Image (cartoon, grey):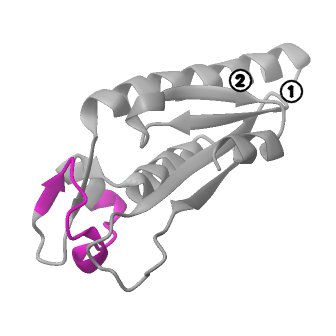
Amino acid sequence: MSDFEEVYHENRKYKITRRYTRIHERKYKIGWLDINNEKHIGNMKNFRRLYRTMTIEETISHGIGTCIEQVNLMSMLLNKLNIPNKMFCTRIYEGDNFNDLEAEEHMHCFVLYYLNNKVYQIEHPSWMRIGIYEFASEEAAIKRNK
């Protein structure tokens, strides 16, 4: 593959990830299915007690997902495009009493992908930061998300 072809393919992949981010923003909401298959959109009440992870197919068909499902969906797309990526999940805050099932969950999942010798983060689960962010290194991206 010539240098031109390599740059063309890398640029095309970047544009595809940008387009996907816009589609994802319109199509998917923050939400979850509980163990009784009831939908919860925009709230985390009883999350610790009733949450279950959804399959990719469920996430797509219901158009909802927690940060866990949304990052899984993004990673699947990146894998299909042969774009190297990693999924991360951080616990931002956990109350002192882990057994308090009424406490809110505070975690953040995100995906990093590697393209053109750079590190990018696709952010959708955190609605205040939706977009694609560029970092000089994986360490810088992880530090930003702690």
Which of the numbered marks, if any, corresponds to residue 9? 2
Residue to which mark 1 is pinned: 1
Question: Which quadrant of the view contains residue 45?
Answer: bottom left
Which residue appears at 62% of the width and 37% of the height?
Answer: 121
- SS assignment at label 2: helix
Which of the numbered marks, if any, corresponds to residue 13? none
Which residue appears at 46% of the width and 70% of the height?
Answer: 95
Residue 50 highlighted magenta (yes or no)? yes
Q: Quadrant of the N terminus?
A: top right
Name of the residue lying farthest toward the bottom:
99
Q: Earlier in the sequence, mark 1 or mark 2?
A: 1
- Of residue 97 and residue 126, the one placed in the foreground of this image is 97
Q: Position of residue 20 (x, y in %)?
A: 44, 29
Which residue appears at 21% of the width and 70% of the height?
Answer: 46
Name of the residue lying farthest toward the front:
96
Between the C-alphas of marks 1 and 2, the distance is 10 Å
| Cβ atoms at labels 1 and 2 below 8 Å apart | yes
Which residue appears at 65% of the width and 44% of the height?
Answer: 112
